[in-house]
Amino acid sequence: MPLAEVVREHWRLVLLTAGALSVGYAVFYAVTTWSLAYGTERLGVSRTVMLTCIMAAVVVKGSLTPLVALLSDRYGRRPLCLLGCTAAALWMFPMVALLATGAPLLMFVGFLGRCSRS
């Protein structure tokens, strides 16, 4: 059975991949939840506008996933993952500044940048 073979022969890689994905999704949901609360409670932006900005960024990210997959085939997974993690960490500061404007287009750009590693 192929799945049993993968787990038996590559268990470390399976655990590493599962951990990396778990961390990525945890960060995505934490940032999204915080941003939604921050935008609605502190900035007074409607929940609908905040959710629209988030969902639009997720749709753009999803449509770019095949392109990023091709880039990872060309340049390697490790360099792209490291670049994505670094970009995501550095983007947090501009993202908060863009959210603080309360302007939907700028908030969308903030979320779009944040979706680079989720």
Image: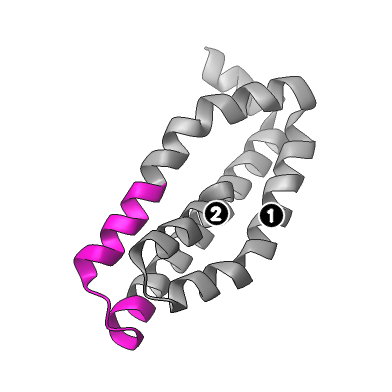
Looking at the image, can residue 22 be seen?
Answer: no
Q: Are marks 1 and 2 in contact (CB under 8 Å)?
A: yes
* For residue 118, side relative to residue 59 (left or right): right
Q: Pinpoint residue 86: horizontal percent, then vertical percent.
A: 73, 55
Residue extending furthest top? 1
Q: Which is nearer the eye, 20 or 44?
A: 44
10 Å crowding of disc 2: few (<14), some (14-19), many (20+): some
Q: Pinpoint residue 7: horizontal percent, then vertical percent.
A: 61, 28
10 Å crowding of disc 1: few (<14), some (14-19), many (20+): some
Q: Pinpoint residue 13: horizontal percent, then vertical percent.
A: 70, 34
Report the amino acid beneath label 2. Gly
**What residue is pinned by disc 1?**
87
Q: Residue at x 56, y 21 (%)?
A: 4
* For residue 27, side relative to residue 17 (left or right): left
Q: Which is nearer the eye, 7 or 18?
A: 18
- Which is nearer the N-term, disc 1 or disc 2? 1
Residue extending furthest bottom? 42
| Cα–Cα span, label 1 and label 2 | 8 Å
Q: Which is nearer the eye, 86 or 107?
A: 107
Say above or below: 99 vs 21.
below
Say above or below: 114 vs 1.
below
> Magenta stretch?
37-57
Determine which quarter of the picture holds residue 70: top right
- Secondary element type, mark 2: helix
**What residue is pinned by disc 2?**
113
Q: Residue at x 47, y 56 (%)?
A: 109
